[in-house]
Amino acid sequence: MKKKMGLGSCILVIIGACVGSAIFSISGMTVYLAGGSAVLSWVIAALLYCAYGILLSELAVRYPSSGGIYIFPKRAFGGRRGSFWGFVSAWGYIISNIIAIGFSAIYAGTYFSAGFPGIASSRIFSIAAVIIAPLIIFSGKKRSQIIQNLLIILLIATMLIYCGSAIFGGHFQSSHFDNFFNAGVGGKGGFLSAVPLAMVAYGGCVAVSFMTSEVRNPSRNVSLSLFLGLGITAVLYILIIISIIGTLPISVLKEDSEMRFIPIFASISVGYLSDSLWLSVLVSVCATIALVTTIIILLRVNARAIQAMSIEAFFPKVFYKEDKNGTPVAAIAIMGAMALFLCFFPEWTSHMITLGAVLNILSMSITCISLIRSRKEGNGTGSSFRAPLGTALPVGVICVFAICYMPDIISGGGKMWLFTAAVYLLGMVFYLAGNRRSEQRISGTIVKGNGRGHTVGMPTANLAVFPGEKIPVSGVWETEVFLDGKIYRGVTNVGPRPSVEDTGVSTVETYILNFDGTVYDKHMTLHFKRFIRETKTFANLDEVKKQVEIDISSID
């Protein structure tokens, strides 16, 4: 059985997914705009993402499958409409994360080369980061989880060392907070202008919601890890912001635009920490660890979304398959290759970040609407966890996020809308190519039957089909079975079972070839490849077994 993440691992995943390039670069811009009140910007941003995370937590326990960014709309709307909105949501999310991976690698190279100048160019370090992250994942689920957790713990420790040195090392200037609301170039409302920038740093808090099948006791751990992980991340961020404000005159950020994007280095090189140059090496290591862990987690989350879409034939099925350690190697490798390509174009950074903002707000909106739809239809697992404030919360989240991201979207101009249209036109190529093939597939949860197949040595998996799925005509089919990251061959009976229970109730049950394991409550997808025969009535189970053996031989 695959080992699942407990509460502690989920918390570390959220921290590792959040703490990336943003706190090391965008933090300076928030201080530039808001001065001391930038602290409020980061608190408000945390609360806004907490609201979105609560909505996703409810969806995650309603539909406890990994690849949630696709699964949530797919299950909430059902049928072809669900597949379409699921694809649109997941496609934008995947592309925005590939952008984030690529530019996290660029920033990793920048920070590492700044701390260790003369060793190699920043591009070499960027390429190394994109290569190292997948290799850690490929080392095996258990080992990679341990390495990932150790890196995140080391990251937290190094961030606290910097903050401790800044706040308690005798260099801190509390007077920098005196003109709390007016020190930044944004004036009294500067802290509100800085909120959208701060929000970028919290995007990873939803990572666990998209990896639900990897979580132990998701109805408890998904939401609890969100609160604890986001809370710890917010405290770390606020300590960093306080440290920057207290050790770096805001005049430096106003006069030197480059320093706005390396504020922690600025506090060491030209600020009041200039006599602690050893901190520059520490910050380089800290930033590099943060960015590598972010890349690891984004690769893992994206891979689950690609797996979910591969089941529906939108991507080649090789991206669904997992190795013996449960790692979707092909999905991770293709994303790493695409991110590696972006490493050679650092000049695209600002355009790509804006594109990512557009894609993110679209995916967020679809996800929030999916929750409203799911509640209305009453589908899902029926978990007791429910986000507060009814429909007002998802509608409010959509409105607030749209308002926050709108300035960046508008600033991109017509060229940005052209890029966005091009991204989705490319996506529609994949969608239309897979749409026809996906009509031959149904998904559901495996439930207990009457167990009579076990008595003759041919146990079957009984599928409770999700609402909205189009079930093929009754009869016996050759099928392809997608289960637990593996693809098996199967023989599936659709319709009543007159030889077993002459109740007239239609069922979908599959004998999975070359499989031996417990499958109850797991999700399974069937691809109906070929109709074998119509349903027949047999005198006893032995005759049923003989016929099934004939059916199996027909597909060998």
Image (spheres, rainbow, N blue to C red):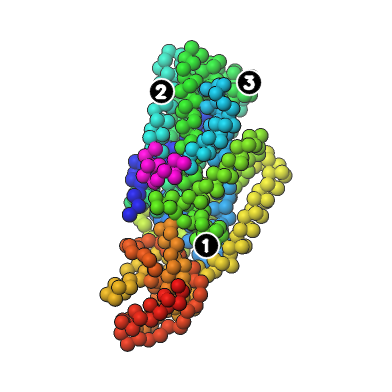
Q: Quadrant of the C terminus?
A: bottom left
Label 2 vs 1, first from the N-terminus: 2
- Kind of residue indicated by mark 2: Ile
The spot of residue 138 in percent (x, y) is 44, 45
With 500 as the anchor, is 476 left or right in this view? right
Q: Nearer the viewer, mark 3 or mark 2?
A: 2
With 331 as the anchor, is 347 left or right in this view? right
Q: What residue does disc 3 label?
A: 256
Graded by Cα atoms within 10 Å as few (under 14), some (14 to 19) or many (20 or more), the crowding at tag 2 reads some
Q: What residue does disc 1 label?
A: 312
Region of the chain picked out in magenta, as a range: 135-147
Cβ atoms under marks 3 and 1 closer than 8 Å: no
Q: Who is closer to the viewer here, 226 or 549?
A: 549
Q: CA distance from mark 2 to mark 1?
A: 48 Å
The spot of residue 499 in percent (x, y) is 34, 83
Q: Quadrant of residue 224?
A: top left
The spot of residue 425 in percent (x, y) is 66, 55
Q: Nearer the viewer, mark 2 or mark 1?
A: 1
Residue depicted at 39% across the width and 68% down the height: 513
Magenta run includes residue 138: yes
Q: Main secondary structure of the magenta part?
A: helix
Residue depicted at 46% across the width and 17% down the height: 278
> Is residue 398 visible to the viewer in this orientation of the structure?
no
- Kind of residue indicated by mark 3: Asp
Q: What residue does disc 2 label?
A: 161
With 242 as the anchor, is 431 left or right in this view? right
